[in-house]
Image (tube, rainbow, N blue to C red):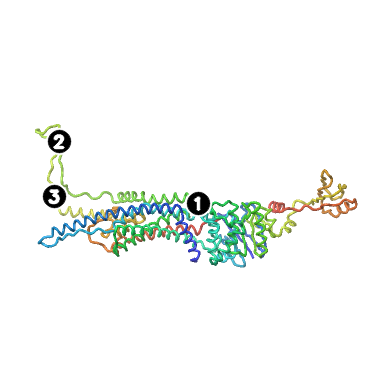
Amino acid sequence: MIRTENLTKVYNGKKAVDSLNLEIAEGDIFGFLGPNGAGKSTTILMLVGMIEPTEGKCFINDIEVARNPLKIKEIIGYLPEDVGFYGNMTAEQNLDYFARFYAMDTTERKKRIEELLELVQLDGVSQKVGGYSRGMMQRLGLAHALLNDPEVLFLDEPTANLDPEGVFQYRELVKQLSDEGKTIFISSHILSEVSKVCNTIGIISKGRLIARGTLEELKKEFGRVGAENQKIIVETVEPLPEIEHEDIISAEYSETERKVIIEAKSDIRDYISSRLFEKGVRVKEMRMEEPTLEDVFMSVYRR
Amino acid sequence: MEVKGLFNVARKEFIDHLTSRKFIIILGLFLIISAIAVHQGIDDYNDMLEDYKEQMSHIKEVEGPEGPVKWMPEKPSILLIFRRMSWQITMLGGILAIAMGFDLISREKESRSLKSLLSHPIFRDEIINGKALGGILALVFAIGIALIISFAMLLLFSIVPDLDEFTRITLFGVVSVLFLLSYFSIALMTSTVSRDSGSSLIYALIILFAFSFFMPTFENVVVESVVGEPPEFPGVHHVHIIGAPSASENESEGPAIKPIEPVPIEEEEWKRYEEESNAYWEKRSAIHDAISVVVPNDNFQAVTEAILNPHFEGLRYGVRYEPPTTEGEEKSLREALEIVWKNILALIVFPLVFFALAYVKFMRLDIR
């Protein structure tokens, strides 16, 4: 659905995006991660046809963006970072202005705008956009990005400025859109947000894609880089017996002796469960501590 | 370029202008001042009409056995009413046009709405052209309203223009729009090159004041320094000689001043003076014309003078704001416009140049 080939953008002799090769399948929710200034927004601007690449190409639905920017804009929706609107107009008037660029008649436009305003909970707000809070503006931005019922949606820092309720609604909306078969490209530096909604992730640093895969793949590949030991957390109903194994490096018992965090050279959960069974200790919980996306990101980024 | 997006942008811009507080305030002020100017013009016209009627009745009285009197007074033209209005347009119109254009692009950059706009299927040239078209329509609306009010006032005072006058007044409206477009395009250009609307307004006002106040002074300085002083008049008509007081005169009264007879001017000397003088004034006029052709105010004054003064002979020797002459034969509109074709061309080219600059800059605008 989305494909880039050696996509490069140079600003004042400096590469903001450097030979980016990316492929995102139809229906994917792709999280584009990277620190500020990594080249995320520049990549999106090239993908939505707002700036031309210095080198390389990008395609959406096999249509080359730089050659057919208008065709691309017909099938995509874009929520820019710090989205802006006309302050002298209401949300409805703003959306109506933008909707006129598409082949929609008056009835269609009106119906679509009503639906979208209801979706982002701005229906019935009669004040002009100039008086909106940043959160309201962001919600209107989401409605604006969905105006043409796009096949591909680009969201640049979508949860910035949203309150917790807004963030929850946004997640629900993304899931709903994904269920409808839309491809969603989310650029963010808020890792928890990406991990909650995205099924594939790409990490960009200094304009280059340095990691790509599902969250599980990335955890497997990068989650234990520089952390060879395993952390096993065990919680029991009765007090824990002493657990001894040659691979155990350390064991940290809680004051009640009903919880222990074991650091071991290998996964010794089988051994622990047998030992506890032998001693008649009932297990409440036993799990290996998973690397978070933060761990993966930092691990990749530090390489 | 597609026209659907262009018309959508133009429609929005036109409505924005008409509902903008600054536009309404300046237009209101402009209309009030124009209406006052037209009212004063009507008073002047009525006074001149009274004089004309008096002169006509006097002529009838003095017509004797030797036949009719050869000299006839001229009926005043209602076009003179609009001369005052043209001055108001020069002064306030420029400010109105700048107020309309100075933040057209910079405001979009500041509010980040430009990125939102460009994410939809629209080319950049449709945006800048649409903004220009919306502005032109708003300017046409402003001038149209001013002219409609003027016509209404004329009819209220039972003054009905004939076809030629109506054509000239309509043409005056067209030229006024062209003049306002000059400053609108300057403001659009500063709005495109400036980082923010504040800077854009300052740059546009600097240009407005440069054309209104600096250029006239600059023109005179250049003309004076290039052509120098006019040739000296040959001979002296009345010379006073200051002599020593005679014995009979009271010393306290000072030296005696005796007038002497004028010195006769030889024909050859006079002819030479005439030639030198003509060459001097022609050179002066040519330099002035060359400079003033880049000043929209000068072009507007020249063209409106040609349209509204049926006896227009051209702005002679670069002397600005000449009073309307009633001497000479009446010129047809076409003849008058032929005299000021350079100024008309300049009024068309000037906004095009600034619009082209704005266009090029906007097409290359970094929208990160």
**Residue at the spot x=75%, y=57% of the render?**
A220
Q: Mark 1: few, some, or many residues within 10 Å (few <14, many ≥20)?
A: some
Residue behind mark 3: B264
Judging from the image, what secondary structure is the residue with disc 2 in? loop
Q: Are marks 3 and 1 in contact (CB under 8 Å)?
A: no
Mark 2 or mark 3: whose residue is earlier in sequence: 2
Observer-nearest residue: A219 or A272? A272
Label 1 sits on what residue type?
Arg
Q: Position of residue B30 (x, y in %)?
A: 38, 53
Asked if residue A125 is positioned above or below residue B261 in the image, the reply reads below
Label 2 sits on what residue type?
Pro
Between label 2 and label 3, give the one nearer the viewer.
2
Residue behind mark 1: B195
Residue behind mark 2: B255
Drawn side of residue B39 relative to residue A73, left or right: left
Marks 2 and 3 belong to one chain: yes
Marks 2 and 1 belong to one chain: yes
Mark 2 or mark 1: whose residue is earlier in sequence: 1
Badge 3 sits on which subunit? B
Instruction: Tell me which corner region of the image, top left, top right, bottom left or bottom right, holds residue A4.
Output: bottom right
**Residue at the spot x=90%, y=52% of the render?**
A278
Instruction: Tell me which corner region of the image, top left, top right, bottom left or bottom right, holds residue A143.
Output: bottom right
Q: Position of residue B164 (x, y in %)?
A: 29, 64
